[in-house]
Image (cartoon, grey):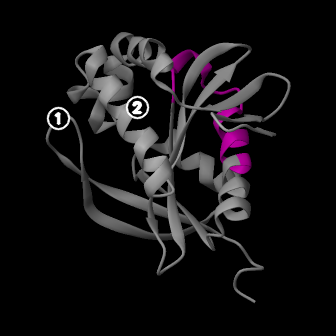
Amino acid sequence: METSKEHIQINVNEYVTLKEICIDDAAEVFGVINTEREYLGKWLPFVQNTRSINDTIDFITYSIAAAITMHELVFKITYKGEFAGLIGFRNADSQRRHIELGYWLGEHFQHKGIVSQCVTVVSKYIITHFGFGEVLIKCAVENFASRKIPERTGFSFVKIEQQAEQLSDGSFTDIAVYSLKNQSFNR
């Protein structure tokens, strides 16, 4: 893992790299969102509001500021040098000592174990570098592909939050909540 003054970069394996997102990534990120709008938009409400590269620039600008002030980081996922998706953490709760982890991946990068490996590495990074005692992942109950990620990577199912997220089509969905606790934190 390399940490520089400018950007954090984590080499997950020989094919997968995570790099802290920057403004220069806007065209790649928007390009995937725009070309995979239907696929990504089914479960990711932000897709319908991402209509131009300026929306993506605004998101990245916010993410950079949040990394400094709120312990939120977003990483660009590359697979064999190609942009594949994003993974990041947000909603830090310093009182409860937990933080949420979220991710998305372009359709043709699915089923390669990319997100599972990234979730494992980023969860360890969160606990080690920020001292949080718990990492949460929240997925729409019927998004079975996304739910397999926490189930595969050592997270425990905690609960269902009823009608907790509004989808792009305006409907609300139940959310499955998963938890990974830092056992040494709880001693």
Q: Which mark is residue 60?
A: 2
The picture quadrant where one finds residue 182 is: bottom right
- Residue 47 in the image: state x and y as whole percent: 29, 28
Residue placed most toward the observer, 42 or 135: 135
Position of the C terminus by quadrant: bottom right
- The kind of residue tagged 2 is Ile
Residue at the image position 22 percent from the left and 18 percent from the top: 51
Q: Which mark is residue 65?
A: none
Residue at the image position 31 percent from the left and 19 percent from the top: 38
Q: Which secondary structure class fits the magenta region best?
A: helix
Between the C-alphas of marks 1 and 2, the distance is 25 Å
Residue indicated by mark 1 = 169
Residue placed most toward the observer, 52 or 84: 52
Q: Residue furthest front?
A: 5
Q: Is residue 19 left or right of residue 22?
A: right
Q: What span is in magenta? A: 105-121
The picture quadrant where one finds residue 131 is: bottom right
Q: Is residue 4 magenta?
A: no
Residue placed most toward the observer, 187 or 42: 187
Q: Is residue 22 left or right of residue 124?
A: left
Q: SS class of the residue under badge 2?
A: helix
Residue placed most toward the observer, 112 or 34: 34
Of badges 1 and 2, nearer the viewer stands 2
Q: SS class of the residue under badge 1?
A: loop
